[in-house]
Image: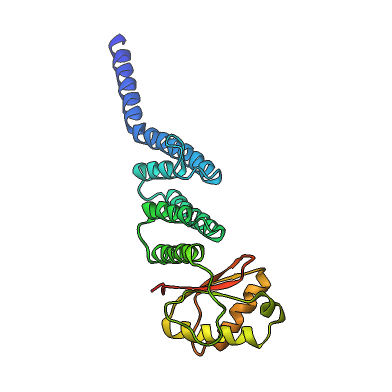
Amino acid sequence: MIKSVTQDCILVVRMLYLLVFMSLPLIANASLQIAIDDILAKADADLYADRLMKPEDSNAVDRYRAVLLLDKTNQRAALGLQQVVERYIVLARAFEVRGDYNMALNFVASAETINGKTASLTEMKKSIDAGKRANRLVINTPKIDFVTTSLSPLQKVFPLNPADLSARNKNITNQLAALAGRVQESKEYVLIYARNDAEGRWVYQQMRKASVNYRLRGNIKQHQNPRVVLDAPLD
């Protein structure tokens, strides 16, 4: 009788060991998922706080990448990295508008470290570089006489007469038409400096109207000294 009870106890213990052994993968998987969810929550918080790649001990990129090391098919982590890239693009455009071209280029470079050198990022870098060169020309170029219809191919900065602009008379429309004709041939990048947004749009519209089957490529910035700057083509 005692022998029978002992054998039954041994059998129960063996069964318990077997059950524990079989459940280990489930326990491990559950623990791993808990760890992944915790990292993702912290990565999302970093993203929304603009802790994109800094500080080193708490940033979105490192945490999303850590998740992908644990689970290379994790869609939430992959999407998080793409959102970081999109955030860098937004920041780059914002600093480009402010005229801080170096910072804008830094943000594009950061996006490239995550997503590689894509066509869209390369195009964006070209646009920022063009704005940077145009801005340098405006700062370093001495005063140039107002032009009418004769344009030197070496001339890059074309002041716009404020009185003519305000009157929107034939002098200014002829000047803008001449500039448009040059750009249509040269494919140069056009940077318009105007006293306000409405004036800048009007300048662009006049140049566009004078262009035949060609879409001007450029940008508009506010400045008290209105002018058109022509820079090297983007392509």
Residue drawn where x is 52% and y is 59% of the image? 96
Q: Quadrant of the N terminus?
A: top left
**Residue 45 place in picture, x, y as percent:** 54, 41
Residue 171 in the figure: left or right of residue 79 = right
| Residue 79 visible in the current orientation | no
Residue 137 in the figure: left or right of residue 12 = right
User: Could you say which quadrant of the image residue 32 lies in?
Assistant: top left
Please count the marks in the image.
Answer: 0
Residue drawn where x is 51% and y is 46% of the image? 47
Q: Residue furthest top?
A: 2
Q: Which residue lies furthest to the bottom in this view?
A: 212
Comparing 112 with 182, the one in front is 182
Comparing 81 with 173, the one in front is 173
Q: In the rendered view, tell whether residue 178 sits above or below residue 120.
A: below
| Residue 3 visible in the current orientation | yes
Q: In the rendered view, tell whether residue 184 sits above or below residue 42.
A: below
**Residue 17 place in picture, x, y as percent:** 32, 24
**Residue 173 place in picture, x, y as percent:** 62, 85
**Residue 154 place in picture, x, y as percent:** 42, 77
Image coloring type = rainbow
Residue drawn where x is 44% and y is 44% of the image? 53
Comparing 4 with 201, the one in front is 201
Q: Quadrant of the C terminus?
A: bottom left
